[in-house]
Amino acid sequence: MNERIFSKVKAYIEKYQMLVPGDTVVLGVSGGADSVCLLLMFCELAKEMPLKLIVVHVNHGIREEGKKDAAYVERLCKERKLPFFLIEEDVKALAKEEKLSEEEAGRIVRYRAFAHILEQNSKDEKVNDKIADGEIAYGKTGGSETAYGKIAVAHNAGDRVETMLFHLFRGTGLSGASGIKPVRGNIIRPLLCLKREEIEEYLNGNQVSFCIDHTNLEDTYTRNRIRNHILPLAEKEICQGAVTHMWEAADMLLEAEEYIKKQSQKVYNECRIKQDEICGTQPLGVVLRADLLASQEPFMQKRVLLQALEELTESRKDITSVHVEEIRKLLNKQGSKQVSLPYGLTAAKEYDRLILFDGDFEKSLLKERKGMEPLSVSIPGCVSVPGLGMVEFSLFSHEKTQIIPEKSYTKWFDYDRITRSLLFRTRETGDYLTINEDLSKKTLKDYMIGEKIPKNKRGELYVLADGNHILWVPGHRISQYYKVTEYTKRILQVTIQPPAS
């Protein structure tokens, strides 16, 4: 065993806190140099700390050598008395069915297999027998992140640099520029600190052979072209040690990303409006304080918006910097504006709020109003109104010495001016108020816009209505037409008792 290389990996594991004593670890082992090195390293680690190791080999059904590779990995496991699981998949068929590249389909199959074996192993010790007997429906459970242990895969330093360049060539942000992460959820990459030469040195020192995947030497995949042409050219023609320098840059970018992530989380928490602070019963997605977000630097605005979008969709693949910039532009626009985004998402600016949600905004508002039926009013009597509380109605004669109350939740109306049965209801087409002594009319919609009542609140706000004539918008104003005057004979008093907080 090469102590220097082993110690380097141990230090890397400790730096990123990849393992804790007692961990169950699924090792993804293809039979290639990297994964065989991973297997040997963990056998040594298990001598120093309690670890439960499980080896999983996935045969993609693409290469003729696949069965030989599987047999070799199985032999390695038998020699070391390690549990071995073989998963066989038709990756070509999956790629065709899901319209994916074979490379992407293979990645999905592998991580699904690792996660499944890890999850099932945590529940039942006899996993192998159950898979063999068809009792476990392989591949039907969850994603790669489970709460049952760790998944160790064998990416090395070169893989990280390849990914870094691949992302940069295609277009990426700070996170993508740091390449493969040492830890993502419960997936760990302990060999990310080793060059391929170090891995082969370790295997030679332990006199252990490995399988060669000849497809890695072909230029079928973009990553292969980076590995086989661009990186050697960089080392030879630009700077010896270029790969090491890029790996170091990736590490610094990762540290910067982690720091910025913590800072952006603080800003996100400050800007985020919790659901219980929002009027209404239907979740609106993510609601942000637009003015507070607008006061941040553009870089931080983008980070917060990306975090909000991540809450609404599993993938950010089709959400580009152009989309984020369109959302940012909403921050400085007045009134109500919205933009459509990939995955059926919408971003809407509602005065002092920025709302990101799944679906069409108007449909979302209609959904909120569904079931909000009009409430009949008895005089005298009481009615419970959603969002307002208990509302009491009483009727008495007007005396000129009476003082009209100025309380927000107690209002007087000229009862004899009411022509229909009163209703508490949400807005309807044709609703209006009278707004001055000349009894000029203003539509309820225009009034709400003028008062900057958010669109998401307008559709669910209960108003007191006499037909289409609105007596009162609670919390705002009453209609001039119904105000008590010296000629009023009977007064309708409406008192709201807000629900206890």
Image (cartoon, helix red, strand yellow):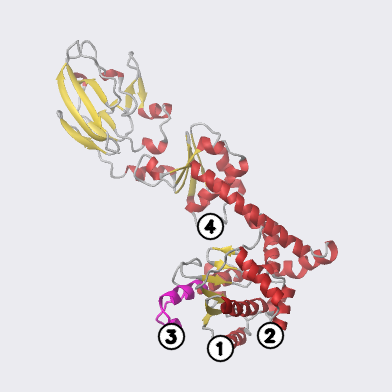
> Is 124 in the magenta?
yes
Amino acid type, mark 4: Ser
Q: Residue at x 63, y 71 (%)?
A: 10
Q: Which residue is mark 4?
A: 315
Q: Does residue 59 show up?
A: no
- Label 4 environment density (alpha carbons within 10 Å; few <14, some 14–19, many ≥20): few
Distance Cα–Cα, label 4 vs label 2:
39 Å
Where residue 249 appears, as percent x and y from the top left, is 72, 57
Q: Which residue is mark 1?
A: 78
Q: Nearer the viewer, mark 4 or mark 2?
A: 2
Q: Secondary structure at mark 1?
A: helix
Where residue 359 appears, as percent x and y from the top left, is 44, 49
Q: Is residue 327 left or right of residue 157?
A: left
Name the outermost residue toward the front. Answer: 48
Q: Which residue range is magenta in the image?
A: 114-138
Distance Cα–Cα, label 3 vs label 1:
17 Å
Q: Quadrant of the C terminus?
A: top left
Q: Is residue 193 above or below residue 494?
A: below
Q: Which mark is residue 209?
A: 2
- Label 2 environment density (alpha carbons within 10 Å; few <14, some 14–19, many ≥20): some
Q: Residue at x 43, y 85 (%)?
A: 129
Q: Nearer the viewer, mark 1 or mark 4?
A: 1
Q: Secondary structure at mark 2?
A: loop
- Label 3 environment density (alpha carbons within 10 Å; few <14, some 14–19, many ≥20): few
Distance Cα–Cα, label 3 vs label 2:
29 Å
Name the outermost residue toward the right. Answer: 237
Amino acid type, mark 1: Lys
Amino acid type, mark 2: Ser
Q: Is residue 93 above or below residue 226?
A: below
Where residue 328 appears, as percent x and y from the top left, is 57, 40
Assess whether mark 2 and mark 3 are in contact (beta carbons under 8 angstroms): no
